[in-house]
Image (spheres, grey):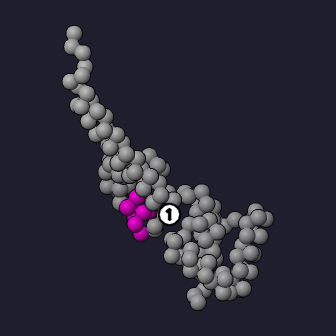
Amino acid sequence: MREFTDAELEAYLDEALSPNDMAEVEQALRDQSSLTERVARTIARRDAGVHSLGEVWRRHRVSCPTRDQLGSYLLKALDSDAQAYVDFHIETVGCRFCRANLEDLRQRQEDSSESVKRKRRYFESSAGYLKKE
């Protein structure tokens, strides 16, 4: 089994790892009592109010784009540097929070376009029934 870094354990506790990495840590926790003790110490340290800069950065998602920025990213309305950063953040860093936000925005965009199509079909199908004055 591999040795996990403190940063990986912090990310595990924040549920910020990829699903595969989360599963790997969970399996290791079942198999290694020493890892369980490390996680317990990390939790105790957090409960005592001792936080590292990296932990604060991850917990408050300082590097994550806002939901508005993610929406602009979908519309390709960001400048090239911002578009490249969001691309990097989503694809390379693999931020689960931003991926979930982006997927939600994509779904809303699809639902919205379906709603417009549906309203148009209703109008077109009932246009002949409108009273003429």
The image shows residue 99 at horizontal and vertical percentages of 45, 60
Is 87 in the magenta? yes
Q: Is residue 119 above or below residue 132?
A: below
Above or below, 43 relative to 70: below
Q: Residue at x 75, y 75 (%)?
A: 41
- Indicate whether 54 appears above or below 33: above
Q: Please indicate whether residue 8 sits to the left or right of residue 47 in the image.
A: left
User: Where is residue 120 shown, x and y percent of the image?
Assistant: 27, 34
Please state the extent of the stretch shown in magenta in the rendering. Answer: 85-92
Q: Amino acid at mark 1?
A: Arg
Label 1: few (<14), some (14–19) or many (≥20) C-alpha neighbours in 10 Å? some
Tell which of 44 and 51 is nearer to you: 44
- In this picture, is 122 found above or below 108? above
Q: Residue at x 56, y 74 (%)?
A: 22
Question: Which residue occupies the extreme top position in the image?
Answer: 133
Camera-side residue: 11 or 56?
11
Q: Which residue is mark 1?
A: 96
Choose top left, top right, bottom left or bottom right for residue 128.
Answer: top left
Rendering coords of residue 85 (x, y %): 40, 60
Q: Most prominent secondary structure in the magenta stretch? A: helix
Q: If the image is split into quadrants, where does the N terminus sit?
A: bottom right
Report the number of discs: 1
Residue at 44% from the left image edge and 52% from the top image edge: 104
